[in-house]
Image (cartoon, rainbow, N blue to C red):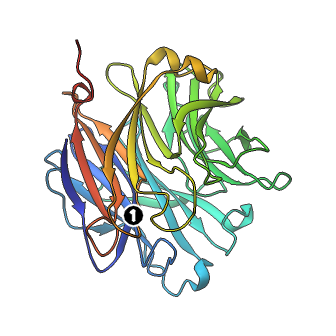
């Protein structure tokens, strides 16, 4: 594995990245700036580009204006951006706008879209969507052309985090009503990663946010996101913000923050970012003991106040995988790292 600096600016906290591979081979990495994870003064959405497979990256450009004077994180500020490529070649960014102090209250959030038809040189947006909630999944396009857009907020009756999804069959002109993707009164379910494993069969992998190190969970839709079954346990303990997709060989790759649970606090429970591989025939398997996952390390944060583990990844046509992640480690503030690896490096065939 090789490591690279995607962006490091010691004057500002850089975190929560995602990455997309454009048709030309250019990569665009989008991420947040702010004063600190717990202080969203000066928050704005930045992006950088690479035309040499992530070995070097451009200077930062900005998708949003800087949010100043955000007392007690009451907003308004843009929070966590995701980026994806649509079938028509356009690049889409979605980001949640936090407007009030209680970010899990539905009325205090909006989600906006931006589109680029020239691989990030110019952007159209922000465009309002009907989606309320925080930390949206990337705008996900099914093979049918349907768009899915998901986010989470607190359920008013259970008091637990619940994941919701909306769909559009006309490229965002109109959207469905809100659909419950995953709810369980035992768990705080959020930050879904979506993957279509066959036409209209979509699996959502979910973070459980109790801080106890519990499993990743998954919900399954067999009708393009209109109805969902589950939730089911996945044998990936402590899985925070799963970023999922299918590799060229058909296996599922999940990259995620590992939170083992225990005494909470900065650096006490979040020092590692991990990856996991799952065979195609296990992705929709509901029983935990019938799923096999191969887990491997990506990076370790040595800082006393470690903070890391929101990731994005792409795979090049020749099989190389490139992951982006934020980490503090040896820097005074969080910054964005890149990692180059190949699947055949992760095991030895006998």
Circle 1 Cα neighbour tier, 10 Å, few/some/many (<14 / 14–19 / ≥20)? many
* 266 and 206: which is toward the camera: 266
Q: Residue 282, image x and y in percent?
A: 51, 18
Q: Residue 45, image x and y in percent?
A: 41, 66
Check disc 1 and report the residue beneath it: 15
Give left or right: position of 38 versus 185: left
Give left or right: position of 125 versus 217: left
For the point 65% across and 64% down, which residue is it?
Answer: 109
* 286 and 115: which is toward the camera: 286
**Quadrant assignment, res 31:** bottom left
Give left or right: position of 5 versus 138: left
Q: Is residue 67 visible?
A: yes
**Quadrant assignment, res 184:** top right
* 78 and 338: which is toward the camera: 338
Quadrant in which the C terminus appears: top left
* 1 and 303: which is toward the camera: 303
For the point 25% across and 51% down, which residue is it?
Answer: 338
Q: Is residue 304 above or below residue 144?
A: below
Q: Is residue 119 visible?
A: no
Q: Residue 331, image x and y in percent?
A: 27, 71
SS for tag 1? strand
Q: Residue 178, image x and y in percent?
A: 73, 44
For the point 65% across and 42% down, which residue is it?
Answer: 165
């Amino acid at each position: 594995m090789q490591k690279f600096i995607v962006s490091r600016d010691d004057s500002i906290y850089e975190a929560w990245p995602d990455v997309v591979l454009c048709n030309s081979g250019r990569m665009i990495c989008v991420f947040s700036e702010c004063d600190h994870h717990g202080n969203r003064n000066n928050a704005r959405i930045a992006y950088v580009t690479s035309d040499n497979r992530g070995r070097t990256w451009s200077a930062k450009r900005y998708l949003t204006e800087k949010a100043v004077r955000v007392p007690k994180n009451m907003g308004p500020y843009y929070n966590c951006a995701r980026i994806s490529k649509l079938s028509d070649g356009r690049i889409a960014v979605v980001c949640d706008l936090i407007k009030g102090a209680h970010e899990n209250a539905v009325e205090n959030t909006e989600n906006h879209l931006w589109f680029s038809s020239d691989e990030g040189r110019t952007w159209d947006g922000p465009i309002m969507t009907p989606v309320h909630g925080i930390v949206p999944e990337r705008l996900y396009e099914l093979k049918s052309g349907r768009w899915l857009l998901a986010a989470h907020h607190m359920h008013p009756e259970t008091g637990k985090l619940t994941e919701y999804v909306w769909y559009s069959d006309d490229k965002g002109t109109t959207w469905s009503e809100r659909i419950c993707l995953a709810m369980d009164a035992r768990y705080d379910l959020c930050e879904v990663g979506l993957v279509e494993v066959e036409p209209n069969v979509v699996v959502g992998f979910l973070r459980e946010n109790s801080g106890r190190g519990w499993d990743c969970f998954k919900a399954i839709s067999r009708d393009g996101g209109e109805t969902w079954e589950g939730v089911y346990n996945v044998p990936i303990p402590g899985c925070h913000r799963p970023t999922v997709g299918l590799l060229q060989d058909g296996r599922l790759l999940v990259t995620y923050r590992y939170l083992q649970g225990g005494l909470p606090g900065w650096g006490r429970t979040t020092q590692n970012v991990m990856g996991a591989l799952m065979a195609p025939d296990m992705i929709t398997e509901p029983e935990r003991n019938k799923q096999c996952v191969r887990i491997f390390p990506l990076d370790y944060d040595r800082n006393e106040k470690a903070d890391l583990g929101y990731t994005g990844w792409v795979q090049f046509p020749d099989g190389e995988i490139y992951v982006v992640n934020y980490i503090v480690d040896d820097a005074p503030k969080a910054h964005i790292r890149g990692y180059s690896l190949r699947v055949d490096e992760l095991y030895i065939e006998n």
